[in-house]
Amino acid sequence: MMGPWTLISLSRLQSKPSYGIFDVPSDKIFTSNLSGIAYDDDDAGITISTLDCVDGEEVSEFGRECDLQIVLDSESTSEVIIELGFNDSSEAIFFPMNSTSNEFAFSTSNWSTPRNFSLKGLDDYEYERSLFGDEENSYKITPFGIVPSSISSSDSVYSAISSSSSIITLHNLDNEPFVFSIKQGGSFLPLAGEIQQMNLGMLSLLSWN
């Protein structure tokens, strides 16, 4: 192998280059800098993860809260401003501001620093599940998604992220009381109106031959 050798590094033309190291004989003289352009092949994306939540029942109509964090998947070439929202705004709100939207800004220097936020379940004051039939339990668990309502950036890769796809799916646990449908001989009785579904406390008053 020829030698001796001297290590030199490439000069950079862009703000985000990859640096190459070359072995060059010490008797060689360069009259100009070596240069190159590096292309970032990292996938642009947004990650939201739960921090302190009940798995599968992250929020509830009882008022249960859930702490989460959001972060970019890769460095952007400019500031990225993300406004988060819900695909169903009747299931949860951002807490404590009690808002259906929340905005986060990431720069080229803090893109990898997660930002924390919280959600709280909303109550629709409607009973949503019966104990009998194909239902497994009397409290309904309704899924909903957090979506990027808007993404603003001069980084064309990040600004092209779809605002219609959920970043994460969460669940809101119903809080209306246990409700039973009255049955006789294995079939639901054809009772009308509110009589067809009764509160658990009233069930003991009923008997059928």
Image (cartoon, helix red, strand yellow):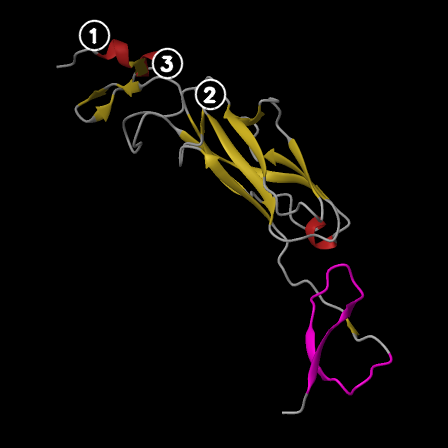
Position above or below: 128 against 147: above
| Bounds of the magenta segment | 4-31
In terms of sequence position, does the residue under pointer 2 or pointer 3 come before the other? 2
Q: In the rendering, at what x and y percent does residue 40 appear?
A: 68, 62
Q: CA distance from mark 2 to mark 3?
A: 30 Å
Q: Secondary structure at mark 3?
A: helix
Q: Earlier in the sequence, mark 3 or mark 1?
A: 3
Which quadrant of the rendered structure holds the C terminus? top left
Residue at point 27%, 10% (across, down): 201
Height in image: 112 above or below 40?
above
The number of discs equals 3
For discs 2 and 1, the disc positioned in front in the rendered view: 2
Q: Write the residue at 38% across / 28% down.
A: 140
Q: Which residue is mark 2?
A: 63
Inspect the image, locate mark 1, and give the three-letter code of the amino acid beneath it: Leu
Give the residue type that dot 2 points to: Gly
Q: Residue furthest front?
A: 4
Q: Position of residue 45 (x, y in %)?
A: 61, 51
Find disc 3 in the rendering and name its residue. Answer: 193
Residue located farthest toward the top when viewing the structure as drawn: 205
Q: In which quadrant of the rendered view does residue 132 lie?
A: top left
Q: Is residue 27 magenta?
A: yes
Q: Which residue is mark 1?
A: 205
Coordinates of residue 27 in the picture (x, y in percent): 77, 87
Task: Name the side, left or right, on which 98 lies relative to 13.
Answer: left
Q: Residue at x 40, y 36 (%)?
A: 55
Q: CA distance from mark 2 to mark 1?
A: 32 Å
